[in-house]
Image: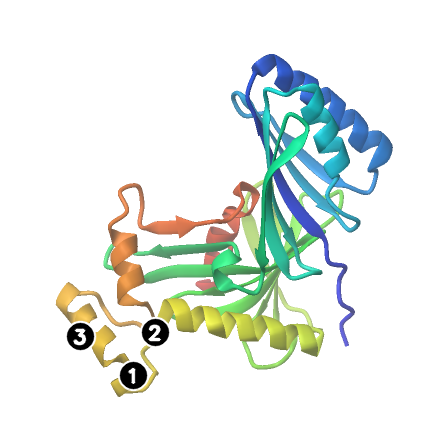
Amino acid sequence: MATALPLFIHAGVHVSGDAAQLESFRELFDRALMSEYPDVICTEQHPEAALRYDLKTERGIPFPALVAASEANPDLRVTIDWVNADTDSRGTTTIAGGRIVDQSTQPLGELSALPLFMAVHEDGSLRIALLLLALRSDGRIGYAITAERDALFYYRLERASDIAVLYLAEGDEAQWEARWEIDLLHGDALHLEEPPLLIDPDQYLEWRSRAEAFVREWLWLDADAAEATAVERQRFLQMSVPVRPANLRYQKLKSLRERRDAPEISTLAQEDRHLANLILECLTA
């Protein structure tokens, strides 16, 4: 039986405001992380007129360090979006002038709160729908479905390496059946022939349950009963959208096709947006 991986708190921190104070904030917060929070895994970015941190920790978000750096730089606004898989919750906290000025929390179990990606082809058929189910210290676990195939996935980064591993579970067994090795420098994906890797049965059932709820909310299947899908089929006929094994629900598709920029929706963090294309490539190989 597979051993459950440790659950991490994942937080995205966005700091904006006066450029001079941004540099001061960065120095204070970075120093505090190094001396007081050595267990925090931190990735730092410096977009124009802002600071961004991606934090992962088992013990908790370093709020005291963020508050102290904010108090010393009162003209900055600090927004923290966090996910705690251990308590099955997520939330947003805003800090200004060293004080928490806004805070909200909601259950992670609500599908609308989970990070997702959705895209369709020009003809309206489903390209890929992806839902992140768990954030791990070394990767991501989620569910992806195309018009033809679906799978649970586990994307794992190899430490101190330019290699990642992608596991897929397409069957009804609690096991990762396929493994792909990803060259992060060149973007190449190599399929490896290896024995299945077992998944903890309880985790598997939980992930499958959430994946099925996601499908019910967003999609309809050609294999579903005709009476249950009659309205969707008629609307697809009227829009000249081909019916595939998996299809986006009419109202979702209509909203997606009305978007001006691109026929897609994404609430994934910037660092996770490559997953959709990567998993699509492996599912359609």
In the displayed structure, would residue 63 be above or below residue 110? above
Q: Which residue is drawn at the image coordinates 27% and 63% (left, top)?
A: 251
Measuring from the top left, give residue 11's x and y in whole percent: 65, 44
**Residue 220: image tag:** 2
- Which residue type carries mark 3? Gln
Q: Does residue 58 appear left or right of residue 239 in this picture?
A: right
Q: Which residue is drawn at the image coordinates 71% and 60% (left, top)?
A: 86
Q: Are marks 2 and 1 in contact (CB under 8 Å)?
A: yes
Report which quarter residue 88 is drawn in: bottom right
Report helix, strand or loop for mark 1.
helix
Q: Which residue is drawn at the image coordinates 50% and 47% (left, top)?
A: 273
- Which residue type carries mark 1? Ala
**Which residue is under mark 1?**
228
**Which residue is under mark 3?**
234
| Crowding at mark 2 (Cα within 10 Å: few <14, some 14-19, many 20+) | many
Gap in Å between the C-alphas at discs 3 and 2? 13 Å
Measuring from the top left, give residue 214's x and y in whole percent: 46, 68
| Crowding at mark 1 (Cα within 10 Å: few <14, some 14-19, many 20+) | few
**Visible in this render: residue 125?**
no
Please identify, in this view, whether the residue under mark 2 or under mark 1 is nearer the observer: 1
Measuring from the top left, give residue 254's x and y in whole percent: 25, 58
Report which quarter residue 160 is drawn in: top right
Q: Which residue is drawn at the image coordinates 18% and 70% (left, top)?
A: 235
Q: Does residue 206 appear left or right of residue 67 in this picture?
A: left
Image quarter in which the N terminus is found: bottom right
Q: Earlier in the sequence, mark 2 or mark 1?
A: 2
Q: Earlier in the sequence, mark 1 or mark 3?
A: 1
Q: Does residue 89 appear left or right of residue 72 in this picture?
A: left
- Which residue type carries mark 2? Trp
| Crowding at mark 3 (Cα within 10 Å: few <14, some 14-19, many 20+) | few
